[in-house]
Image: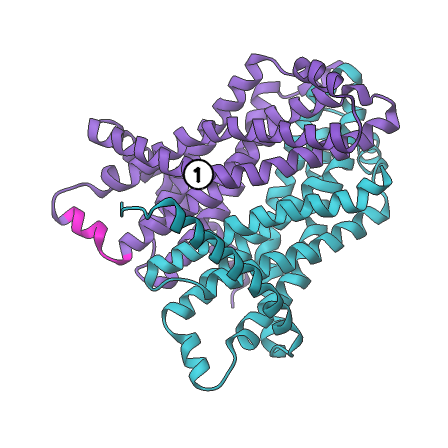
Chain colours: A purple, B cyan
Amino acid sequence: MNPLALLGRPALAVLVGAGRVVAFAPAAALRALATVHGARAAVAQAVSILARCAAPVMLVCGPIGAMLALQGLTLMRSFGVERAIAPLCVATIVRELAPGFAAVVVAMQGGAGIAAELGAMRVAHELDALEVMGVDPRAEVAGPRIVGAAVAAPLLNGLAMVCGVLGAWVMAVPVLGVPHTLFVDTALDGVSAADVWLSGAKTVLFGAALGAVCASAGFFAERTAAGVGRAANRAVVASVILILLLNYLCNTAIFGMRGGAVAL
Amino acid sequence: MSARPAPLPRLAAAVADLTGAAAFWPRAALATLRGPPLLDTALLTLRLVVTSVPVVFVVTFFSGAMLTVQAAASLSPFGGGALAGIAVGFGGVREVFPLLAAASVAARSGAEIASQLATMKATRQTDALEVMGLDPLRLLVGPRMVAAVLGTPVCVLVGCAAGMLGAQAIGVWQLGLDRGAMWNNLWSGVVAADLVVGAVKGVVLGFMLGAISAREGLAAGPGARGVGRATNRAVIRALVAVSAASLALSSAIYGRLA
């Protein structure tokens, strides 16, 4: 096989996929929001994503907060700054870990669900049936799911923050013996209201992006059972990569190109 | 949307489902021990590594980059760049990169295992095997379990390296830190034992995500809908299990030293 073709084929596939998402998703989301009926469907989708993702978000973010406290305390004890454990944990969770991992959970649970559902509708010719009846399946089926993901993600981010901080508290206070009053009194020293708002804004972006990727993957799935599985698989992988990439770009935009290194 | 059953039967169904999932694990472990077909095993292991490594590389590279930007900003009152390198290297290699690498393997290859097995179930290929007196657990699950157990540690180590490279690239090109100092800081908190721990974690997490994905694939409902749902379930369950196990392993290994 031609080695150049081997390299070019995945690159082309990525470009085609990205083009599809850009051409398909914003129009679908806007058209869904243009009608009252579509907006209501979007709210229903947001509620369904919230219900399906709440438990996984708690189960994933609690341990991550605890892990952060454990390793943070190990590192900080060696520098003798363990008094700063609570602000460090809370700031890292609110700014980074909660939005990042909440979005990954939404991609794996909600996003894969969207792709699987739309793919199954494609296989069962339900999307074609809608079109025949003169109903636009983009606005009717895909759009509300994209908007729903963008609405649900920031709310799940809030839940992730609470669970992460609780996890960190459990590891720091009862297990590792940090005084409870120290933890509670200093917990909010590292974050401002702006951090919470920025974190929420990031997750709106992540939710919209993963909703768009997953809805397109499902909408354009092959018409076989195997095709639906592949669509859900591809949707998850692309969403996770996109979330990490966007997270890095957001951080650079928020902290500026030179970040905190100015202080050196 | 179909009407939902009452909460109590739903709870009972969930418990039954989880029990079924837990009961599958020893069967999956046995399936790997009963001599899975060699060629399939080798090819599937190769496939898992080749398809997962690019995903793992991109995900951990950008997580290293993101953590560096974030840590440099948060730690600037304590001396910024130098501490950021130490914190990212230490926290990254011990926790973040292995966890994200395992999550990426679950998303790329775990979901693929689930969707392949679910497709075979939906098209009755597994039934056909059983009718011919062949055991789908040994023939289909065994090789995939071995692939996950062998491939995930490789992906974890690649993830650690990629995360460090991401942190270094951003530290040097974007934050303008000194090249040699940044690299030294990144590795200053890491000892060789951390990489061994990472590989051990990779083996355990690989077994878990392989077993979960295979089980969800074989328990898939009929048709395209069943395949999609199985893929979805495999991914999210693997993520939850992997992050819980990662914490349990960390506190067992590092908690004692702290």
**Relative image position of residue A195 (x, y in whole percent):** 57, 17
The local crowd at label 1, few if under 14, some if 14 to 19, many if 20 or more residues have their Cα within 10 Å, is many
**Relative image position of residue A254 (x, y in whole percent):** 57, 19
Hey, which residue is sitting farthest left in the picture? A133
Q: Nearer the viewer, residue B86 or A6?
A: B86
| Residue A47 appears in the picture as rendered | yes
Q: Nearer the viewer, residue A233 or A179?
A: A179
Residue A128 belongs to magenta span: yes
Q: Quadrant of residue B154?
A: bottom right
A17 on left or right of A247 = left
Residue at the location (45% across, 86% down)? B132
Residue at the location (36% across, 34% down)? A47
B161 on left or right of B63 = right
Residue at label 1? A210
Q: Nearer the viewer, residue B141 or B147?
A: B141
Q: Main secondary structure of the magenta part?
A: helix
Magenta range is A123-131
Residue at the location (76% across, 30% down)? A72
Residue B200 belongs to magenta span: no
Locate the N terminus of chain B by quadrant.
top left
Q: Amino acid at mark 1?
A: Leu
**Relative image position of residue A117 (x, y in whole percent):** 33, 50
